[in-house]
Amino acid sequence: MPKPIILHLGDPIAYNHSLYDGAFSSRFTIIRNEDLTRESFIEALKTNKYGPITALFRPHFASGNEMIPWDASLISLLPPSVKIFASAGAGYDTVSIPALTARGIYYTNGAGASDEAVADTTLYMILSVFRNFTASQLAARSGDKGRFLDCHRDLAGISQNPTGKVLGLVGMGRIGGLVARKARLGLGMEMGVRWVGGLREVLGRADVVSLHCDLNAGTRGLIDTERIGWMKDGVRVVNVARGGVLVEGDLAEALRSGKVSAAALDVHEFEPRVDERLVAMENVTLTTHVGGGVVETRVGFERLAMENILAVVGEDGEVVGEPLTAVNGREVREVLEGGQRSE
């Protein structure tokens, strides 16, 4: 009996060789995708080039994305044998989860693997917006002695300790919860989430607002001029979620007016382009979407992608269990149990 086919998207694995060469390769036939443009990938699906694929396997978040977006038109071309799309990374804004769900296909991400790294990055961002570390770094790197001395003298008059300040978390999943614990224990901060009064109350009470929500139709552009207006004067804003959650033009205006006193962004609305207005501001910390960027995260992403497929797909290619980190687990179960899978 032939083994179920796994279509491997993107770079080869780099870390979990014992799992890949052992249980994963033993149960499945693994085929590397050769079609590195959207057009050629669509043609490959139309001609059934890779056969009755059982799972899509994307173990590296920075590769295997040649065919995006995974919209309904692309997903409709997948063979009916596909049971799961197991991807590295945490975000899934380039994938139509409803279209996969309608086909009875699980989508899994690397949920949990990047939690520590993203939470630690958030603490760095919080410290930076309270202590004006970016302005200090720029002065130190300038080679200008006068600028160095001015910064040494002046920053103490506008910087604050985060201890005792209220942290407002927008998004209280795994990462938000971990940030709350780390910020409370490590920085002595108070949690705006304790008031559970809805978004407006959290924004209104926070000394720093930190974004940790998914990007979807309901959260795109969530933090705009109106909601910034709900915040305290002089609030700080941190975004380590997704760039599209925050309207950067509105943030730039709020920074100019002083409504927002400082901001820190690891993700950007039009990434990889960074807003030039924000680049020019010394009270804005900017990084290159590296919140989860550590070796431990990559190891976890890669391992989880394999473990999710092993949990779902049996030796005969049929569904034998539930994935570990499904984005649409409940919805797919309902489709499968109701026999409503769209082919």
Image (cartoon, rainbow, N blue to C red):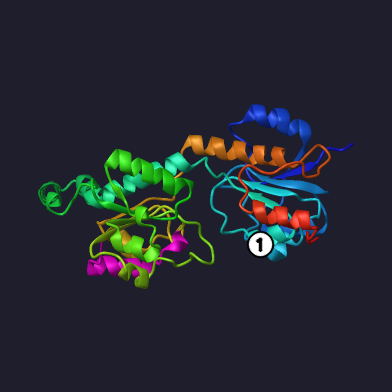
Specify whether 13 is left or right of 279. Answer: right
* Chief secondary structure of the magenta portion: helix
Q: Is residue 1 visible?
A: yes
Q: Quadrant of the C terminus?
A: bottom right
Magenta stretch encompasses residue 293? no
Quadrant containing the N terminus is: top right
Q: In this view, does 30 lie to the left or right of 280?
A: right
Residue 134: x and y in percent read 26, 50
Residue 154 location in percent, x, y? 11, 52
Q: In this view, does 279 lie above or below 132?
A: below
Residue drawn 52% across the image and 40% down it: 113
Q: Is residue 291 above or below residue 235?
A: above
**Where residue 97 appears, x then y in whole percent?**
64, 59
Q: Is residue 121 visible?
A: no
Please tell me which residue is depicted at 55% across the width and 37% down the height of the picture.
300
Depth check, front residue: 87 or 66: 87
Along the line of sight, the residue nearer the viewer: 196 or 86: 196
Please tell me whether residue 251 belongs to the stretch shown in magenta: yes
Amino acid carrying label 1: it is: Pro
In the image, residue 34 sits, relative to residue 71, either above or below, namely above
Identify which residue, 150 or 99, lies in the foreground.
99
> Element under label 1?
helix
Residue at the image point whose x is 64% and y is 38% from the top: 12
- For the residue pair 56 and 279, the one nearer the viewer reads as 56
**Residue 116's quadrant in the figure?**
top left
Tell me residue 26's x, y (percent): 77, 30
Furthest toward the right, the residue is: 1
- The residue that mark 1 highlights is 98
Residue span colored magenta = 243-261
Count every numbered label the image shows and give the total: 1
